[in-house]
Image: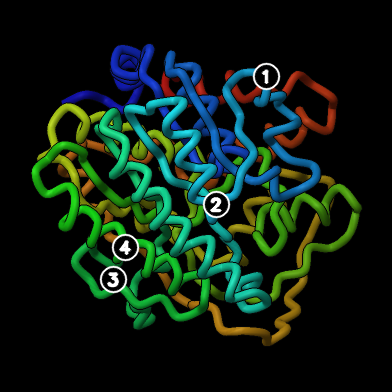
Amino acid sequence: MTTWTSEKWNEFCEFYKGKKVLVTGHTGFKGSWLSRMLANAGAQVTGYSLNPPTDPSLFYIAGLSDTMDSVIGDIRDLAHLKEVFLRTQPEVVFHLAAQPIVRDSYKDPVYTYEANVMGTVNILECVRLTPSVRSFLNVTTDKVYENKEWEYGYRECDPLDGYDPYSNSKSCSELVTHSYAKSFFSEGQTAISTSRAGNVIGGGDFANDRIIPDCIRAATAHEDIVLRNPHSTRPFQHVLEPLSVYMTIAMKQYEDTGFQGYYNVGPDDKDCITTGSLTDLFCEAWGQGVKWENRFEGGPHEANFLKLDCSKIKKVFGWTPRYGVKEAVGKTVEWTRAYLDGEDMLQVMDGQIEEFFNS
């Protein structure tokens, strides 16, 4: 069994070197890290996305627009997408573009469904019309499952029925993918998979309404961290964990369509912790006397208890999480300190990627 260390990185380099890869949502937090990992593995990376969703943004901080073919566009624009597919002729496609924030989906549900559902339709339509594509991965979320607030992790065979507009639109995105896979790709010309990831943390996430970015903003402003729901349990993992799994799924199913399917990727049970416990870890790593306060605001419904059963991906690919949640928080603080100190953030990213696979 290949270990999830330097051998895995060498396997990535052998496979992705020279491959034409398209990443939607490349200007976002996860998309930026994924694009850099792919480029470092030797891929010819094209990104298709709106301008970065935050200011500051990891994409601009690291100067990623200079390291890849970056196309600014809207996944709701099918004609533009078709032009990009026709020009680049990708072999592997990762679909990350989405409206990703639960609370924002309550504010603008129409846009959320347009981006997350019709955006998926448009990407799959382009894949259908582009014979060069051999491997497609739709990145969704752990929130696609019908949440019964039970204590065991959700499995890939459990019902999909997200509650809020974000979660529900991602459930719909899954169903669209399943339909296209059965309707247009059943003969195996293109391998189609989805991956349902837990909550990711890592350097360069500046989004609103995410716990670690909120912690960092409060800490740098020398203010107490405000938690709106410290008792909610989530599967937290470092951003490089699911990205390495995405790259593995896309690679393995390209070589053998028997690997296509639906995959959970999340931390071990011990790292499914409350947001209060996560914030305690942040306060410990950050130091400087930073602390948090409980200020439950009510607000729109969000799941209270959620975790994933990741036994399938461990069995199929021999995957085990590289970092526990404490290490993940530490790496995030390390990245943030470097950024605040004015370091070369592309070098910092590359250093953290190399350390993830080689230490």
**Mark 2 vs 4, N-terminal side:** 2
Distance from label 3 to label 1 (Cα)? 44 Å
Residue lying at 55% horizontally and 38% vertically, measured from the top left? 48
Distance from label 2 to label 3 (Cα)? 40 Å
User: Can residue 270 be spotted in the picture?
Assistant: no
Look at mark 4 in the image and give the residue it sits on.
176
**Mark 2 vs 3, N-terminal side:** 2
Q: Residue furthest right?
A: 222
**Mark 3 vs 1, N-terminal side:** 1
| Residue 333, placed above or below residue 120 | above
**Mark 3 vs 4, N-terminal side:** 3
**Mark 2 residue element:** loop
Viewer-nearest residue: 108 or 201: 108
User: Can residue 280 be spotted in the picture?
Assistant: yes
Look at mark 2 in the image and give the residue it sits on.
77
Viewer-nearest residue: 243 or 237: 243
Label at residue 66: 1
Horizontal placement of 108 versus 151: left or right? right
- Three-letter code for the amino acid on which mark 2 is drawn: Asp
Label at residue 152: 3
In this rendering, which labeled residue sits more in front, label 2 or label 4?
2
Q: Residues within 10 Å of mark 2 (few under 14, many from 20)?
A: some
- Three-letter code for the amino acid on which mark 3 is drawn: Tyr
**Mark 4 residue element:** helix
Q: Position of residue 3 (x, y in %)?
A: 26, 25
Q: Position of residue 195 (x, y in %)?
A: 33, 51
Q: Residues within 10 Å of mark 4 (few under 14, many from 20)?
A: some
Identify the image quadrant of residue 336.
top right
